[in-house]
Amino acid sequence: MILTNRLFERIPPSREAKSIYIFCEGAKREFDYFEYFKELDSRINIEVYKLHEQEGNSPSGLLQIAERCINKTSENPNPKYIFIEGDEVWIVLDIDKDKFNSREPQIKNIQTRCNELENWHLAQSNPCFEVWLYYHLHSHKPEFEKSEKCSEWKKLVNNSVKGGFDPRKHPIYIETAIINAEKNFKLVGDKLDFGCTDVYNLASTIVPLLSSKLKRVLNQIPE
């Protein structure tokens, strides 16, 4: 059963409500996932930035895009979004290491910058976003070889459910994912352990805004 979001009347969002601005490295899977919640209730101010092909999606590049879209300065008088008190900015990243291990210092810099800015947050998955998707469907960490490889996580998630993870219906299990991801969360020093994600912190911000709609959709799922 495809749980489309056409079940609900389209109502313009109220700017009195808190806005959540999400910037993801992934131009497709992450965007589709978070866009689900924007479509679920049009009154909720969830803005998911869609990367253009020519835009760099390195961690540092994503931070620059976010700052350009949010922070109003003399050099940037007309940012894309109007950020007001109470709004939140989330930068969603993978920890997946590159050949020269250039991502780690970039991510540390982003964390430092987020700590400097009000209501800016970093959400990470080790090694990739599919770890977060996995916990929508499973309650325990998987045991498989090459767990540090993103390609293996993608296979695991796609093989976990018939037809693979579907952004048109499986995000509805976000509350289950929060419980599972938090239960399995572990730090090694100051770094996320393999198979861990703290995207549940972002999800915990989204869920209260949509609790009634989430329940209505879940009640329509056949047991």
Image: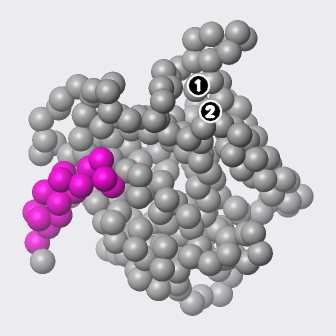
Q: State the SS at label 1.
A: helix
The residue positioned 48% from the left and 21% from the top of the image is 82
Residue 215, quarter of picture: bottom left
Identify the mark at residue 66; answer none if there is no mark. Answer: 2
Q: Residue furthest right?
A: 100
Name the residue nearer the viewer: 17 or 148.
Answer: 17
Residue 101, quarter of picture: bottom right
Rounded to the nearest whole Å, what is the CA distance between mark 2 and mark 1?
Answer: 5 Å
* Render colour scheme: one colour
Residue on which disc 1 sits: 69
Residue 93 in view here:
yes
Location of the C terminus (image quadrant)? bottom left
- The reply, left or right, for residue 42 in relation to residue 137 is left
Q: Relative to 72, does residue 101 appear above or below in the rendering?
A: below
Amino acid found under the numbered disc labelled 2: Ala
Amino acid found under the numbered disc labelled 1: Cys
In the rendered image, residue 182, in percent from the top left (x then y), is placed at 49, 73
For the record, the magenta segment spans 207-222
- The reply, left or right, for residue 130 in relation to residue 112 is left
- The reply, left or right, for residue 164 in relation to residue 60 is left
Kindly indicate whether the residue at mark 1 contacts the one at mark 2 (C-beta within 8 angstroms): yes
Q: Relative to 158, does residue 65 appear above or below in the rendering?
A: above
Identify the mark at residue 159; answer none if there is no mark. Answer: none
